Image (tube, coloured by chain):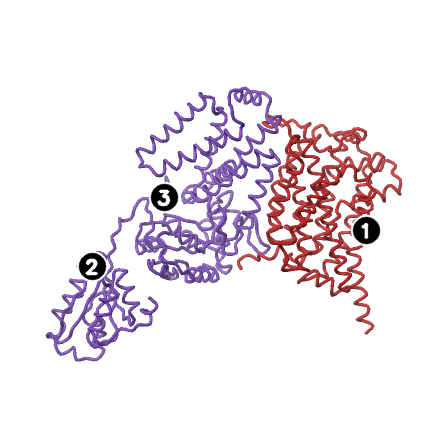
Amino acid sequence: MISKNRQISEFQFICFIVLSFFGINIITLPYMASIFENEKGYFLIFFGIIMAVIYALIMDKASSYYKSGSFYDFLCDGFNKGFANFIVLFFVIKSIFLAAFSLSFLVSVIKVTLLQSTPEHLISILMLLSLFYLTSKESEDIVRIYTILFILSFSAFFAVLILSLKGFDITNLYFYGGIKPSKCIIGSLYFLNMFNGIEGSILFSNHIYGDSKKPLTKAVFISSVLMFLITIVCYGKFSFEDLKTKLYPLLNIMDSIDFPGAFVERQDILVMNFFIVSVFAYIGYNVFCSFKMMSEIFPKKRKWFNILYILIFIISLRTDVVLLFDNKFLLILSFLFMLFFILFPILIITERFIKKGVEKNL
Amino acid sequence: MDKDKSMHIFKKLSDNKAYIDQKFNNVQDLIKRDFKIGGNETDMYLIYIDNIVSTSIIGDFVMTSLMLRADACENKKQDFLNYVREKYLSIGEVSKIYTFSEVFSAVLIGDSVLFSEGCDYALQVSTKLWPYRGVPKAETEVVVEGPKDAFCEAVSINVVLVRRRIRDTRLKMKRLTVGRRSRTIVSLLYLEDVARDEVVKEIEDRINALDIDAVFDSGQLQQFIEHKWYSPFPQMQLTERPDKAAAAITEGRVVLIVDNTPFAIILPVTLNVFFQSAEDYYDRSVIMSAMRIMRYFAAFLAISFSGLYIAITTYSPYVIPTSLCLKIASSREIVPFPTVVEVLLMEGAFELLREAGIRLPAPVSSTIGIVGGIIIGQAAVQAGLVQPVVVIVGAFTAICTFVIPNNALVSGIRISKYIVILLSAFFGLYGFTISLILILIHITSLKSFDIPYLFPYSFGPKDDLSDFKDSFIRAPFFKMAKRPIFAKPSQKYRSSNRRGKK
């Protein structure tokens, strides 16, 4: 009534996306980059940014076709009902798995750093209960919550990160480092995979007020640049060889900072809080997207969707993310998710092009 | 009552009397006065309730005028009561009423009702004189500099206190009645050209839709019209200060003054307004901005400090400096309880002391402070039931709540604090972070008449962010040219943005 409550600003949308995708990945990105790259140099991440931005441009184009109303109806309108059902179902399964993987990851990190004696399932249950409360809210409320979380957590995080520049060794940095083109492609695909699940943002893009130009591209670009900067900080702070031995280099960076006259002795705890917020945001994003998709198909059976929490809980207990690459089933599943993630916007755009072509011919 | 609504006043005075006698059976403070005017030719009947009317007004301006001055020939006129009203009743507010429900309402609010033989209507004569304790001094929202007067229990006086501050014809006052039995008067005040029409209408609709027995206080009415009953955070603002109510009206908000209570309701609200004190606007902006920041900081500490202490000392002691950590550990040696029990004991003791202090008379309540704060606190430490640091944590949290200028918000914070304490006790810093996120989710999703509760921190795409100038900080007045979000967009500017210049 007073403020346009059902709508969000472009700024809020960008905060929402950055918080959902940046925090969860940044904790391990430098380590993973060094593993994948197996070479000195940060060119690979630079290449990854280009890939991510191209993907975001395609996704923005796909989002521009979906103006208002139910997304499920939009899919049914474009494809036949069976295929629309398949897309939605696959999307929901994927979101559940991504949420469960992240939850399992969070639990394993928290077990090591904070709560050694607390049972894993209690940690998961607390997170799922808070997500249950989050998903009971409307889309615009969620975006607003994320904006405030973004401002609060990121301002603290960056203040600490700037302090970490002390001891930064520029000689540790190599731009190219003799990377092979094949590794470049694999590495950049890995980088792109960090945004896996971002296709759900299409459900929020039609809430943006006014003529927003490529909001997702802006959000992805900002996230990528931040990831890039943090990776550089990690490279500069530790040597390339050191980085390979550190699973969570950001925690190590924070631990190495000395605040002048500081009261907090272990700064890595600040990153842990940031990490908890980020994982919460990422899981919340996935769960909310799957809830929204489901409620568009079965609008009157919202209570039944709570079964998704039980699924997430069970999967998170059964999944060890660290062993993800040793498990064939999970590896195939990850590959399928990646495929869906890439094909999703392309499908929508192709369908529109074909439809336009047919209309022209008629 | 429904029957009375449709029941018209009879032409025959005896029928009217019989009906009134039936309705007011055993109501012994109802004064019924029969008299004749115009050379004993016309029967008149006056009713009112004793002690809520001004007997001097009735004597001087009703009875004397009618009995001594009304002429004999005039009672032949048609529409006799109207003639009496125009010629003999020298009182400002006299109106015609036609149904018995109007008669009873008039009598019960302190007016007198005059019947006449042969007239199928009556005259409602304003003779109200309710007992009230004068204009008191503000007690719950005390300021060092600024007006000292406060609302009292009489709605008419309270409206006058606001009118004294806003002398504008566009200040509108709608009188609504709530409660089937209490018939409580609720005055709705707003600036016609500044307040949003949709907000005024919705408030009016919500109040008119109420079907309850009685309303005795603004807090009661507030619970009937708020959005989310389960939220510990206030969704309306109560104030006893007329200057605060007047300021809210000029911002485009609506003020509800409920009869029989010295607290007015201001709505819509945002979380931000609960951190604003009347004094903020009477002193210089730099000083008051510092105070504002301190209040926000205090509110954060009031919610989080106890929980953070538990999380750190129980799960992550390595976060704090080693010397402090060792000191806490050594003082904990003799304490038989876990930290969370200690903290809950202290918090519980403070809550009890606070409650006891409120209920007791002022001289005794200061003794309770001494007994609770010094004797029990010190004795508990010496007995080894709690460690001194926990007493400091509890006391510090309590002091932080005193800094917040709104009592309702303090209550919300006190309740929320326990969620943080419990989750921190079970899950350490993880639980601490999650509990704060949960509280944030809750307050972000609250709305007051469609305005986000966290505005301007959580905003919509079309919202004007000039409200930040009166949020964490209080900008100088010449910088706050725009009205807050509550006002109509067409009335956005309240002043020129230059000092003393057009």
Callout 3: chain: B
Question: Which residue corresponds to mark 3?
Answer: B146
Question: Which residue corresponds to mark 1?
Answer: A339
Do residues under tags 2 and 3 come within 8 Å of each other at their CB atoms? no
Question: Which residue corresponds to mark 2?
Answer: B28
* Chain shaded red: A
Residue at point 44%, 20% (across, down):
B382
Question: Is B188 situated above or below B466?
Answer: below
* Chain shaded purple: B
Q: Residues within 10 Å of mark 1 (few under 14, many from 20)?
A: few
Point out the tag, 2 or 3, that comes first from the N-terminus. Answer: 2
Callout 1: chain: A
Q: CA distance from mark 2 to mark 3?
A: 46 Å
Which residue type does callout 1 highlight? Answer: Leu
Which residue type does callout 3 highlight? Answer: Gly
Q: Position of residue B68 (x, y in %)?
A: 11, 69
Q: Seen in the image, is A249 located left or right of residue B159?
A: right
